[in-house]
Image (spheres, grey):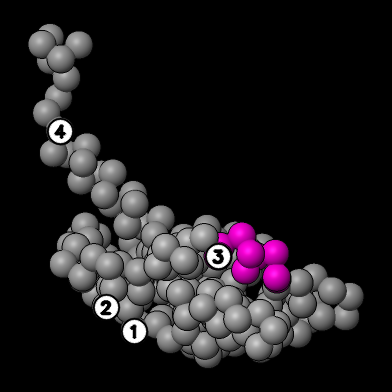
Amino acid sequence: MRRAVDAVTPALNAGLPLVVLEPSCAATLRADLPELLGPDTPNAARLAASVLTFAQALDEYAPNWRPPRVDRPVVCQTHCHQHAVLGDAAERTLRERAGLTGELSGGCCGLAGNFGFEAGHYEVSVACAQEALLPPVRDRPAGAEVLADGFSCRTQLHQLAGQRARHLAEVLADALAERRTKSEPPLGPERT
């Protein structure tokens, strides 16, 4: 972890945020890093304070940016570490502004990093997924987007439900690309 702090110190010195897409990594950097490294690594606290999720970064650095309208329902759950450490207010606002409707459930996917892969944990991992992760996906309305910002959540969905889930950033990137394609004039003889 000290190497991670050292690697990003130039960015910290420049006042840049550390935008982290994976909720468990963001939570670890924000909450665990300063605690694990303690006061002997003063840049650990600076790094922790600079960590933002994708939606938090947009909210702070581009508050007037208008996301593309996706206009469809969403299902799944907020990553448990994000819920516990980072909160999801910025993500909820961004989803609303993009027309992604519906609340994400709480709970844990059950994979929790490598927990679900370790011997003796599979049944507990699946039981956790059956509690909160899988029911809204099974019962989703037609055309609903399955969101899962965490790698563990996406892995559980793929392995237990055969379902591909996407990060909010992926959904918005696809919508931006689609919007760009629709607004570009078709290639004509003058543009070949």
Q: Between marks 1 and 2, how big is the CA–CA gap?
A: 6 Å
Q: What secondary structure is found at the residue carrying circle 4?
A: loop
Going 69% across and 84% down the picture, which residue do you hit?
40
Badge 2 density bin: few <14, some 14–19, many ≥20, Cα 10 Å: some
Amino acid carrying mark 1 in the image: Ala
Q: Which residue is mark 3?
A: 9
Say if mark 1 contacts mark 2, CB within 8 Å. Answer: yes
Q: Between marks 2 and 4, how big is the CA–CA gap?
A: 29 Å
Q: Nearer the viewer, residue 75 or 152?
A: 152
Estimate the x, y position of residue 44 in percent, counting from the top left: 60, 78
Q: Which residue is mark 4?
A: 184
Q: Nearer the viewer, residue 185 or 127?
A: 185
Which label is found at residue 93? 2
Q: What secondary structure is found at the residue carrying circle 1?
A: helix
Estimate the x, y position of residue 177 in percent, counting from the top left: 28, 44
Q: Which residue is mark 1?
A: 89
Q: Quadrant of the C terminus?
A: top left
